Every structure is written in C-alpha cells, then in structure tokens.
Image (spheres, helix red, strand yellow):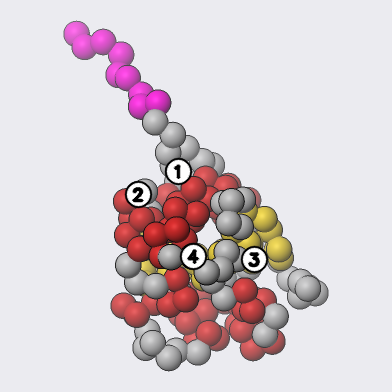
Amino acid sequence: MDGPKKKSKKPSATNSSKPLDDVVFFVDRSLGRKAVPEALRAAGARVEVHDDHLPQNAKDEDWLAYIGERNWVALTQDARIRHHELEFKALLRAKVRTFVLTAKGLRGEENAAIIVNALPAMLHILAKHPGPFVARIARNSKVEMLYAGVGKRPS
C-alpha cells in the first residue's frame, strides 16, 4: 500500500479561486508575440496571440468583439482603451475582461515577469467579476480594478 501523496509546496498561479485551465488570455499586439505569451504558457496559462487570429492592423473594436465572442481575457498595454469611445463601447458590448499593463519602457521579458507575477491576483478578479471590466497591472505586479460592470466610464 502506498503512503499518502505529497502535494507540491511550490506556489502556483493555479492556487487561486479560478484555475488557469478555465481562462484563455488573448495577448494584444501591444505586448508582442514572444516574451509575454511564452512566459504565460510556461506558467501554465492558455494563450492566444493577436497576430495568429487577426490582421496586424485590426481595429481595437474588431479584436474586442472577436475575443468577446470566445470569452477570452484581454491582455494589453493600451491604457487608452478605456478612454476612447468606440473601443470602450466595444469592450462593454462584448463583455470583455481586460487587464492593462501600465508599466512603460520595459523589455518584453520584464513585461512578461510582471504579468506572470500578477497571475494569482488576476485569477482572483476573474473569479469574482464576469465582465466587462478593466483592471490595471502595475510595475510591481499589483492588480487594481479600474472599472467593473456597466455605467459611467472610468476617468
């Protein structure tokens, strides 16, 4: 008879209220096609990359509708998305759950590390908020909700 199975003590992004298996992250072209997607996949996330599905010059309102239909989660560095009327209306209409990396001037690997470190907090928000929403990922990997639900657009 075998002894009790040992559980890994390694912290994991899956030690959250919403497993990574239930989420598909869509990496917008503003975050690139290599470093961020590869780091997320290495952390166990399911990832789709903008250029694998849409033309490079796809309008924001088009890719937002596309990922909303698939219930994917947007990862972008485009902080303007919540301030531009067309994009924001598309985000609301498609009920897109959006995380915006606000750190600027960093290399892809640095962006990737920030997002991977933020995964547990992101999964926590995803478990609590069905969308639409916009949350910010800061340089220190802290995640803060900027907008949730419907109503007045955030400033």
Q: Which residue in the structure is indicated by mark 4?
A: 106
Specify which label sits upstream in the sequence, 2 or 4. 2
Secondary structure, mark 3, is: strand
Residue 7, magenta (yes or no): yes
What amino acid is found at the position of numbered circle 1 in the picture?
A: Ala
For label 3, count other residues whose C-alpha is less than 10 Å away and answer few (under 14), some (14-19) or many (20+): many
Identify the residue shown where x is 45% and y is 43%: 13
State if disc 1 and disc 4 touch (CB < 8 Å): no
Q: Marks 2 and 4, how far apart in space?
A: 23 Å
State if disc 2 and disc 1 touch (CB < 8 Å): yes
Q: Is residue 58 above or below residue 2?
A: below
* 4 vs 1, front mark: 4
Specify which label sits upstream in the sequence, 2 or 3. 2
Q: Residue furthest left?
A: 1
**Number of the label disc, if any, that sits on residue 13:** 1
Identify the residue shown where x is 19% and y is 8%: 1
Q: Marks 2 and 3, how far apart in space?
A: 23 Å
Q: Marks 1 and 3, how far apart in space?
A: 21 Å
What amino acid is found at the position of numbered circle 4 in the picture?
A: Leu
Q: Which residue in the structure is indicated by mark 3?
A: 133
Q: Which residue in the structure is indicated by mark 2?
A: 44
* 2 vs 4, front mark: 4
State if disc 3 and disc 4 touch (CB < 8 Å): no
Q: Main secondary structure of the magenta part?
A: loop
Q: Marks 4 and 1, how far apart in space?
A: 23 Å
Q: Which residues are magenta?
A: 1-9
For label 2, count other residues whose C-alpha is less than 10 Å away and answer few (under 14), some (14-19) or many (20+): some
